[in-house]
Amino acid sequence: MESLGATSRSVLYPTPGVTELSAAASGPGRAHFFQDNREFAVIGTTFYEISQFGVLTSRGTVAIGSNPATISSNGDGGGQLFITSGDNGYSYDLTTNTLSQVAALNGKATMGDHLDGYFLALDAATSKLYISALLDGTSWTTGTDFAQRSIAPDPWVSMKVNARYIWLLGEQTLEVWYNTGATFPFAPHPSGLVPYGIAAPFSAVTLNGVLTWLGADRGGDAYVLRAAGFTPEVVSDYPLQRILNGYSKIDDAVADAYSDEGQTFYLLTFPNENVTWSLSVQSGKWSERATWISEENKYTAWRPRWHAMAFGEHRMLDSETGSVYRMTNSLTSDVGGRVIRRMRRAPTLSAENARVFYSAFEVDLEPGLGTATGQGSDPQVMLRISNDGGKTWGAELLRSAGKMGEYTKRVIWHRLGAGRRRVFEVSVSDPIPWRLTAAYLTFGQSPNGRPSPRQAQSGA
């Protein structure tokens, strides 16, 4: 909120919903790519082209493994795509629409990318970087056209091209390579070895010239790093780092990124933990992005995955099914038409463990946004209260956010009792364009049995 007279410094707007454009027969989404008005995806074991209207056309089959697939292009000069899937490499001719397997890369292509007319394939099992012939993704001389890591002992496990550089990441250190113009064109940059590695090989993404990944150091700690130049900076805060380092498995994390309405988001999903963390780059704030499973009364990792900006739309695949989605903030449902349940939980309120009496709690939002009919015609805000720091919760207390046109509606709860370690939690699920700006409390301590009212405001 950049206006000097704004209600608060920030406002909570809705995360996007999705609507299905089409669905493949089976298999989860594994890679997504758009260039020159053509959209492609790897879904299960099939390489698809997707039309503007979501029609799927099979362009061939690929191997499948435990890793995601990758898709890269050598541009107008080559007219080809390079696909890695199941540790194999494939070349796709954009003129003839034919997919062919690259025999030289069988079992040697963990992930792929492109730089300066050369396709790149990293074999994480042997820590080797292979390059194709110039502008020809069908020609690979793997016996000679490769580089082996030698600067540091930890093997390369991940690779990402950012601008004109190849970032080759080990588990503890990384190095940046560039095109020297020699017979084998790529060599380490003089900037030297960077003392950060990568904890999850498929957590690295580039967006707007910045590389972001789940990093690690020699001490074994994990944190999220970003690098616009050669010097990474930590962008995860201490609470998140404590959570990450408490997970039983983090090397399976996969990342995605997109920009929308002036915000850039880095999404990091941990399949084993079934959770997705989201970084708003501009604000530096972290939150959870989740799919609500109403029949089980729980959140899971956010299912839309593998973003591509295609035909002027945000397009996503599904991490569990073969669906292709259009994504926008104007949509109000999740995958499979599921309700999006949005939740904001405040920190614990405590005054040196004294008993605090709460006279009123008010949510400041934009009221009167109800739908004309059906669900959302009288949108509800759900409040839960915990008096033991979030361990156990009371029943939901509902208040209307205002029917259509009720622009002066206040969302307020009175006579909320007392507690020593209180947590307030607000949830909404009606399909309206929610805007939450702040919350207000009237409270007081009572050393003599009579509350002494005070007021406090919290921004979004």
Image (spheres, helix red, strand yellow):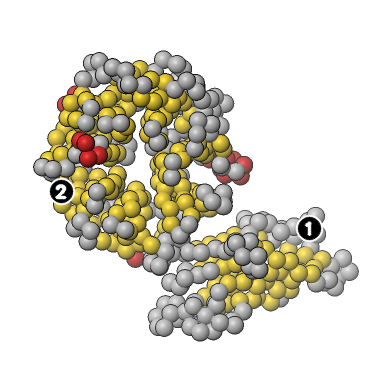
Q: Residues within 10 Å of mark 1 (few under 14, many from 20)?
A: few
Residue at image position (23%, 20%) is: 142
Residue at image position (73%, 66%) is: 456
Where residue 90 appears, as percent x and y from the top left, is: 20, 34
Front one among 62 and 79: 79
Q: Which element is circle 1 on?
A: loop
Figure quadrant of the C terminus: bottom right
Residue at label 1?
351
Where residue 70 appears, as percent x and y from the top left, is: 29, 39
Figure quadrant of the N terminus: bottom right
Q: Residues within 10 Å of mark 2 (few under 14, many from 20)?
A: some
Residue extending furthest left?
96
Where residue 319 appears, as percent x and y from the top left, is: 33, 49
Residue at label 2?
58
User: Which amino acid, mark 2?
Assistant: Ser
Q: Quadrant of residue 237?
A: top right
Where residue 371 appears, as percent x and y from the top left, is: 43, 79
User: Which amino acid, mark 1?
Assistant: Ala
Residue at image position (38%, 62%) is: 328
Residue at image position (41%, 40%) is: 205
Q: Is residue 345 above or below residue 407?
A: above
Q: Is residue 459 above or below residue 41?
A: below
